[in-house]
Image (cartoon, rainbow, N blue to C red):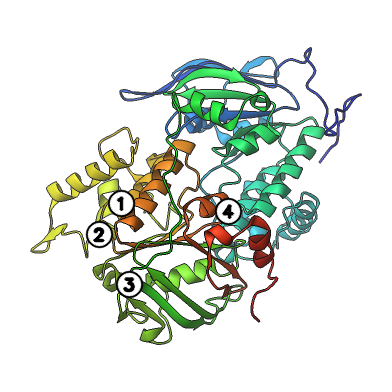
Amino acid sequence: MPHNPGDRENEKGYTPVMQASPPLLAAEGITKRFGALVANDAVDLTVAPGEIHALLGENGAGKSTLVKIIYGLLRPDAGRLVWRGAPVQVESPRAARALGIGMVFQHFSLFEALTVAENVALALDHAGTVSEIAENLAETSRAYGLPLDPSREVWRLSVGERQRVEIMRCLMQDPSLLVLDEPTSVLTPQEAEGLFATLDRLRAEGRSVLYISHKLEEVRRICEAATILRGGQVVAHCDPRAETAASLARMMMGGDVVPIRHDHIEAQGPVRLAVSALSLPPQHAHGIALEKISLELRAGEVLGIAGVAGNGQDELFAALSGEELAPHAGAIAMDGVAVGRAGINERRKRGAAFVPEERLGHGAAPAMRLSENALLSGHATNGFLRHGLVDRAKLTDFVGKVVRAFDVRKGPADPEARALSGGNLQKFVIGREIVRQPGILVVAQPSWGVDAGAAATIRQALMDLARAGSAVLVISQDLDELLEISDRLCVMFMGRLSPAMPTAHATRESLGLLMGGAGMAA
């Protein structure tokens, strides 16, 4: 990728934005309606050359709609786009790429049966052979601190690794403007640091980044300008480096985020979930074997499991949920009943609930409506079936209860899951399980891709569920989240689980050492 430094560099090593330069991209008066919903209302946005510009707003504020217009996936009802000083009509993603606009979406758009190199080849308009692309990809991904094995099939990759593929696939298109929608939501802290270094390099090369994130501290760290949306309208332009995370959140939400109420406790209730020396071979060539996993989760507590992606968290979730069966029934017990050989419906009937980390495709069927998705997960437990027929009234009432309790903003009465913004779908998928008041809840990445207000709502709901007598297990790569809501913490490394420690005794340093394998039993 070319390097075009300016005459001067600032203290961070990147070229400062020159005031005389025309904007790389200007969105002027962009308006987009979906029926009665005005998703974008006369939105103005300007991105300068060599600038990392944040686009902020709570879930449903109109961010995704705006960037889809910029990338040619949607056509505005009013307003225009100006590229390098000239008005343009971006009628398709291919046209956007031809201009020099690349985009990494919040939801993955990869073919799981194909290799990493084959997925990248499909996105390149002027590609060489797959072997040539694989060689270039391996070299470029290492150079940008996002290493990939081009020969691996996508279905074998962790969520964090899939995000790397999406980012590198875009970078291989040599964009002048890179649009990133929640790029760190599934990255480990180490992977996020690699991405930030990549962004600094892109900025030094004179490229621009339009950056969507709900992680406000990282916005303050890497972005020098921000446009804030609320209710589809621009409510502020600012330099996030001159703001606090609280002031940015206040502009996004129109008020202060309600603080979480939580006192770390030592639960004295009965053991509701017990795992005893659970070992499972890897389910595929690149999978992680689980080795003698043992834990006890009591009524009234939140147990957090930390770890770098790809260390067995997916395999543990599959074993707990019943998607993969244990070698013997006694390896997993729920409320004293051996369920290791029971499937997911049987475990749900015993009061368990499960929320996987990949919400679209695993947690929800994209092309099915919210009511249909609620039926898929709740048909065995929620009383939606009567004499073999679906009780539509009860199903509709349940969806409405979830929508109200978790402020799911959805437009039509019963939209398809893929029509929701990522954060709103996350709220629905988690709310669908919490509203049931399960006795045991296993949830992975609960606040992935949601705004500060929604994250606080979800985390408070998890803690309230535990305090009401349920047992809650949270698998997360977000240490801040785990330290905030967990009563005890474990760490996964290479298929092994550390002994649980009280959160009050945990430090970032001690957790970081465990995440790197130090002190883990062989």
Nearest-to-viewer mark from 4 and 3: 3
Q: Looking at the image, which is closer to me, 408 or 284?
A: 408
Q: Is mark 2 on a helix, strand or loop?
A: helix
| Residue 223 found in image quarter | top right
User: In the image, residue 221 lies at what x, y percent?
Assistant: 69, 35
Q: In this view, does 110 lie to the left or right of 396?
A: right
* Whether residue 359 is situated above or below residue 30 in the rendered picture: below
Q: Which residue is drawn at 27% across and 53% down?
A: 374
Judging by the rendered image, the residue that carries numbered circle 2 is 378
Query: How many angstroms separate mark 1 from mark 3 (CA)?
Result: 25 Å
Task: Determine contact: label 2, label 1, CB under 8 Å.
Answer: yes
Q: Is residue 179 visible?
A: no
Return the residue found at the far left.
Answer: 387
Judging by the rendered image, the residue that carries numbered circle 1 is 432
Label number found at residue 92: none
Query: How many angstroms separate mark 2 from mark 1 (CA)?
Result: 9 Å
Q: Looking at the image, which is closer to me, 331 or 366?
A: 331
* Whether residue 310 is situated above or below residue 17 in the rendered picture: below
User: In the image, residue 495 lies at what x, y percent?
Assistant: 58, 74
Amino acid under disc 2? Gly
Query: How many angstroms separate mark 1 from mark 4 (CA)?
Result: 25 Å
User: In the image, residue 57 lies at what x, y percent?
Assistant: 50, 29
